[in-house]
Image (cartoon, rainbow, N blue to C red):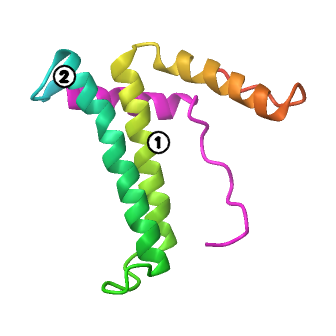
Amino acid sequence: MTDQQAPAPSCPSSPDVWSSVDALWTWLDGDRPHGGREGLLLRILKLSEEVGEVAQAVIGVTGQNPRKGVTHTWEDVQGELCDVVITALVALRTLTPDAREVFTRHLERVTARSLGPSAPPARRT
């Protein structure tokens, strides 16, 4: 992992992210074995699995399991973190068709609370 900052990717409120989230949601909903409340809960629980994969990658990159040694890279950790974000956005989309607006409003509140009034506003699309 380097200390240099890579160029910022598209903000989660950008159209390409949300069109991908909608496409993934549509694909997953088209072939889901459990519908209704149970399906929603299982979609949200998927986040726990993804977070566990982040932990596994961090353990693997640091060699914390002496039996396995170093098994992952920081790029693996980055990919697993991206999977968490994608899974969370799809779960939010499953919970509400207004996921983009819900996320943008929440991001604005968290940013203002954390960075204060001088915080840049979230990009609205």
Label 2 neighbourhood size at 10 Å, few (<14), some (14-19), many (20+)?
Answer: few
69, 21: nearer the viewer: 69
User: Is residue 50 placed above or below 66 in the rendered structure?
Assistant: above
Residue positioned 40% across, 50% down in the render: 51
Label 1 neighbourhood size at 10 Å, few (<14), some (14-19), many (20+)?
Answer: some
Give the foreground label among 2 and 1.
2
Determine which quarter of the picture holds residue 97. top left
Q: Is residue 15 magenta?
A: yes
**Any part of residue 24 in sight:** no
Q: Which mark is residue 85?
A: 1
Relative horizontal placement of residue 18, taking residue 65 as reference (left or right): right
Secondary structure category for the residue under label 2: helix
Residue on which the image places disc 2: 38
89, 44: nearer the viewer: 44
Q: Position of residue 104 (x, y in %)?
A: 61, 22
Residue positioned 70% across, 22% down in the render: 109
